[in-house]
Amino acid sequence: MSEPILSVSGLTAHYGDFQALFGVDVALQQGEVVAIIGANGAGKTTLMRAITGVARVSAGRIRLDGCDITGTPAPDILMAGIAMVPEGRRLFPSLSVEENLLIGAHARRTRGHWNLESVYRLFPILRERRDHPGTALSGGQQQMVAIGRALMSNPRVLLCDELSLGLAPVVIREIYAAFPEIHASGASIVVIEQDVGQALKVADHVHCMMEGRITLSGRAGELSRDAIHDAYFGATH
Amino acid sequence: MFSLDTILQGLLLGGLYALFAAGLSLVFGIMRLVNLAHGDLIVLGAYLILGLGTVTGLNPFAAALIAMPLMFALGWLLQTRLLNRVLGEDILPPLLVTFGLSVVIQNGLLAAFTADSRKLAAGPVESASVAVGPVHMGVMPVMTLATAVAVILALNLLFYRTALGRAFRATSDDAVTAQLMGIRPQRIFAMATGIALVVAAIAALYLGTRANFDPSIGPARLLYAFEAVIIGGLGSLWGTLAGGVVIGLAQTMGAAVNPEWQILAGHVAFVLILMVRPRGLFPRAID
């Protein structure tokens, strides 16, 4: 197997005295989609925050293309090519839709597939609403802005935290319909999902997390519903 | 009841207070930092212009042009070396540090320049006036208000039309998410304080040419600036201009009734407006 574009090994993280991650190992191959599933509080978001440099890492290594990026400040992680769609979207309320997109390319101005025009082609509704405050949009449209904002830096790795949270199934389908084009643009993708069905549909590999540990890993097609159920809720003995 | 002249003088004086307040408003808007040393930094700027003028022989306007980049550098250093270290969830440490800074600047100026009051001599323009209909207006006060409007306009363009302004607003909204965009909040803050001190240098020019100054007058300038910012609504730059004009008008009208009431009238106007509009005249929609 070739060198993964993103690899996390033995990652441990704390929130104060509370240990959120216990030696997590995850690898993302170039061009792959990896899904991380698990219940609330399983440590999925902490893992994302650690990768993007927002949360501190207690032990373990994070590598991007073989380079150690553990403990690198968040802005430098973005510059290295990892962009995140944060949980809850976190649009900037003082910025219009278009400004929210532009700020995604504020620091990392890499030539690539993604710019205002291609993001508007991907999500045409955003062009219509470009001058509205980002937060005046519906939840699904806000999620589109958050994805577009992350894409504007032409990331090599895109992290998506809970895209479907609080959205209607039809809206979730609409958002995931954008994935083939994002994938085709060359970005490798990590999605965090509570919606197991959606995760299995979109991902090549799936990791299930529980209480800060990876409890199950495998190819999306090869994991049985029962195994996922056990890994998700804890095995019943 | 009040002559047209009184009202115009008040309007023009408001320009000076808006200049005092613009830098304070900018810094508060971006990093929620109340800089208690802002008035003293303006006075420091006046001494800087005075010193540059003495050394180079330039008039205060030219000296102020040299002082502006120096004040930017001072603001940048102040933010990166000192204020960035104390900014955080707790609002008390930055307040204490800027209060301490205020004391340090006052005493530093006292040691360097004595307590003697000084003035920036701008030459004949100081006493020049223009006739507008029935009233005569001093050229300097008119320039002060025009400069205040220009500064507020420029800051607004910077804020709402440039990539830097976008980064200012994004950082002010949510500094953690801004970092995910590759924005370095500490650098943004340094830029903001640098710009605020450039505006302070402009304010210093008009402070020093209008009247005498000495090392102790900073806190009173801070108070007027603060009132202007609050009256206008926190974080609104046009509001800050309006707030400055309100204080200026109130002071001039108060003085027209009884010269002893000048300062008091400004403070009374401040209290009255807060009673009617607790969030100021132009509160920001999002906070």
Image (cartoon, rainbow, N blue to C red):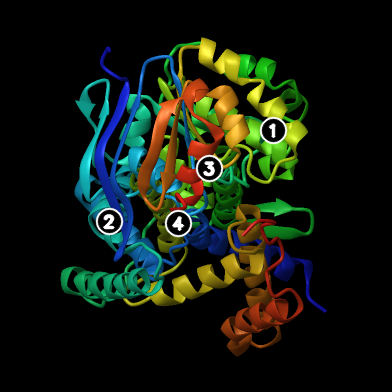
Left or right of A128 in this view: B113: left
Q: Which residue lies under the disc numbered 2?
A: B78
Q: Nearer the viewer, mark 2 or mark 1?
A: 1
Q: Quadrant of the C terminus of chain B?
A: bottom right
Q: Amino acid at mark 4?
A: Met
Question: What is the secondary structure assignment of the residue under circle 4?
Answer: helix
> Do the dots labelled 4 and 2 sit on one chain?
yes
Q: Residue at point 70% right, 28% down? A: A173
Specify few, some or many for label 2: CA neighbours under 10 Å numbering under 14, 14-19, or 20 or more.
Answer: some
Label 4 and label 2: CA atoms lie apart by 14 Å
Q: Quadrant of the N terminus of chain B?
A: bottom right
Q: Which residue lies under the disc numbered 1?
A: A172
Q: Amino acid at mark 2?
A: Leu
Q: Residue at point 65% right, 56% down? A: B286
Residue B169: tell me if it is visible. yes
Label 4 and label 1: CA atoms lie apart by 36 Å
Quarter of the image for residue A71 reads top left
Q: Amino acid at mark 1?
A: Ile
Give the number of the disc on residue B31: 4
Question: What is the secondary structure assignment of the residue under circle 2?
Answer: helix
Examine the rendered structure and indicate whether residue A1 appears above or below residue A225.
above
